[in-house]
Image (cartoon, coloured by chain):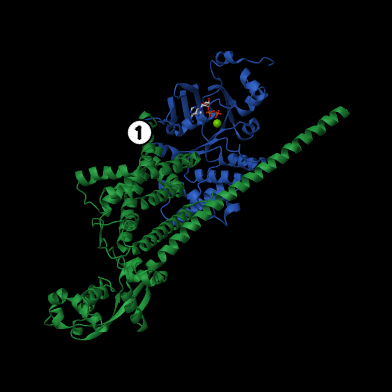
Chain colours: A green, B blue
Amino acid sequence: MSNKMSHHRSNIEQVRHSLKKRHRQEKRFILLGKLSVLTGFLFLAFLLTDIGIKAWPAFQQHWIQLDVTFDAQILDVEAPADEAALKKGNYRGVLKKSLYAMFPDVSARRDKKALFKLISSGAEYQVRDILLADPRKLGTTQQIWVLADDDVERFLKEPALRESQQSDRRIKDNQVAWLDQLSGQGRIESQWNWAFLTSGDSREPEQAGIAGALRGTMLTILVTLAMSFPLGLAAAVYLEEFAPQNRWTDLIEINVNNLAAVPSIVFGLLGLAVFISFFGVPRSAPLVGGMVLTLMTLPTIIIASRASLKSVPPSIRDAALALGASKVQTVFQHVVPLAMPGILTGTIIGMAQALGETAPLLMIGMVAFIVDIPQGITDSATVLPVQIYLWADSPERAFMAKTSAAIIVLLLFLVTMNLLAVVLRKRFERKW
Amino acid sequence: MTQVIEAPDIHQAIKQTVGSPFTHKPKISTRNVDVFYDDKQAIFDVSLDIGSHEVIALIGPSGCGKSTYLRCFNRMNDTIQSCRVTGEFRLEEEDIYARGMDPVLLRARIGMVFQKPNPFPKSIYDNVAYGPKLHGLASNRAELDEIVVSSLQKAGLYEEVKDRLNASGTGLSGGQQQRLCIARTIAVSPEVILMDEPASALDPIATATIEELIDELRQNYTIVIVTHSMQQAARVSQRTAYFHLGKLVEVGDTNQIFTNPQHQLTENYITGRFG
Ligand SMILES: Nc1ncnc2c1ncn2[C@@H]1O[C@H](COP(=O)(O)OP(=O)(O)O)[C@@H](O)[C@H]1O
Ligand SMILES: [Mg+2]
């Protein structure tokens, strides 16, 4: 009896001993998990802060105020009504004259050139548009704010540059003196850069905006969604609900899964060969971009949709069929709506992939430098990730900020899309 | 009585159905039914009549083919790719498996209630209204309301849910869900209702409610019920058919089957020797 008891006790001891070990294991794992999450979070925070700081200058813009005289002689315009002449006018001359008048001491050719470089090369179009809007201003003198050159911009944004050697910066000492004089007269002002969000790309960083790429992305994603969602859904529903189970459908299933693993650039080559060369779809346009991205996202949508359809309990199908619903009615009135949250999730994941895709779009010419904001799906366009790639590749320092700013816009776009997905999913979700 | 029949002898032992499988003017008649899943035969040469306005219970050990046989009546087996049915099924002289017979129409005439309650994840109202809408049984909203209410009443559920017809059907208790499924089936006004172990997922009180309901429904419908509970068969049915390994062993009045079984296998089953 006592023997039995002691045996019993040692058993409990044994368990207690191992219990300690197990608890330790559990604690260790939880700690590890927390650390991993924290690390991931820190990386993300670091990345976002870095991008945010770098992007900040892109949202700020410096303007210089000039007294511009619309001198008919310099402009070579005889009558204010002559629109063609107004358009062709020598606005560069007008601007030069205005600047030289403000700094009468500057006389050397080189210095004059340096002086004129303080303002953006786009200023002449800005001034032209003011006169075109109101030709009665011909002959008058107007105070006009024009954009500063990107080098000036950078100099004004980075105080450290002022202290550095003249040879180390693009703004020379005499230009610094002129800028100081202008700012002393209250003729330099910093403003929120709305133009970044409303204008297209440009070779000049101070004029370059994201609107073109943003519109291009929207159009491309719309084309992708409009094509891949119905195609993917139809394919998934057919394969899952209607297709007979045989070797052919097995083969198709394997191929769809393999397709999801094909590098995206291959789809770009395929798009170039088939859509552009064979079918003659206009290149560089959102239409062909969307078609290529459709190829890429279809497998994702099909796989996710099939998994979601499969997870609808068979008892629901039985219930509908037993009430006399036809196969099609059963599928579209019960199964598909119940699978919708999963289908939408798959679609959004596909769209998010498509949104960040660069490589296949390079192959079909969406990498071209395009100033105009695309108006339709057949206009030449580029998309946000390609724009980021283009700007990151530009030599001008100011494009660095633009790159970060474009990344922020892309991220915001993604977040908006995901929020939309969450809202949609909530609406379709049903309680069991 | 003490003798237990060993498996190899069983097919020998069931040469022919014992009892009275045929009735005068049956609602449904089945003759020489064989059912296969691919090469595997699940039902062997079953012939049985279902009388009008009777409750007939199909009993037998698990896996003996009760559900398979039941699902032939409304052609639910059509949805299983590997399943093949031969033999004759007639619903009042009409051939159920005829080329011209539309399963949609057939299932409007022969409703089905499943083992696990399976309401749609929709409102109670929409659950019941789905069938009538599908078949265009109501020409306006008022008529539809009428059908929904009377179906819920016949299923004995109306009093419990009348204040929350727009609440989700899946939020009800198991027994209520099953009665909702019965109401949903009744709403289409079928002539026959098939029930596959309708109470096996329910607690005793909910089971009792369902059993009372089945007894009431007999007034208006013909009911074929599969059950693994012999007590249930004894309580709700007028006739009982005993299946064993895909064969119909014995059919007869419920009373007679439970008090005086003719076949050795039936006796073994009802005395609890296997099952
Ligand atoms: N979908 C199916 N595919 C293949 N075999 C099946 C299928 N359904 C049932 N069976 C087989 O048919 C036989 C009868 O099953 P079932 O009719 O469900 O029996 P019961 O309802 O009497 O328990 C069993 O051997 C079972 O394994
Ligand atoms: Mg069964």
Q: Residues within 10 Å of mark 1 (few under 14, many from 20)?
A: few
Residue A347, percent across and down?
40, 49
Q: Is residue B202 above or below residue A149?
A: above
State the SS at label 1. Answer: loop
- List the residue tagged with mark 1: B100
Q: Residue furthest bottom?
A: A140
Image quadrant where one finds the C terminus of chain B: top right
Chain assignment, label 1: B
Pick the residue in front: A206 or A354.
A206
Quarter-of-image position of residue A260: top left
**Residue at the (76%, 34%) spot, across then down:** A14
Quarter-of-image position of residue A299: top left
Pick the residue in front: A38 or A105.
A105
User: Amino acid under label 1?
Assistant: Gly
Residue B146, percent across and down?
49, 53
Image quadrant where one finds the N terminus of chain B: top right
A220 relative position to A280: left or right:
right
Residue A262, percent across and down?
35, 40
Residue B265, percent across and down?
62, 19
B182 relative position to A111: left or right:
right
Q: Residue furthest left?
A: A78
- Asked if ligand 1 lies within 8 A of label 1, the reply is no
Q: Can you see residue A336?
A: yes
Q: Is residue A192 above or below residue A402?
A: below
Where in the image, quadrant-wise, is ligand 2 located?
top right
**Residue at the (38%, 34%) spot, across then down:** A254
Q: Can you see residue A80?
A: no
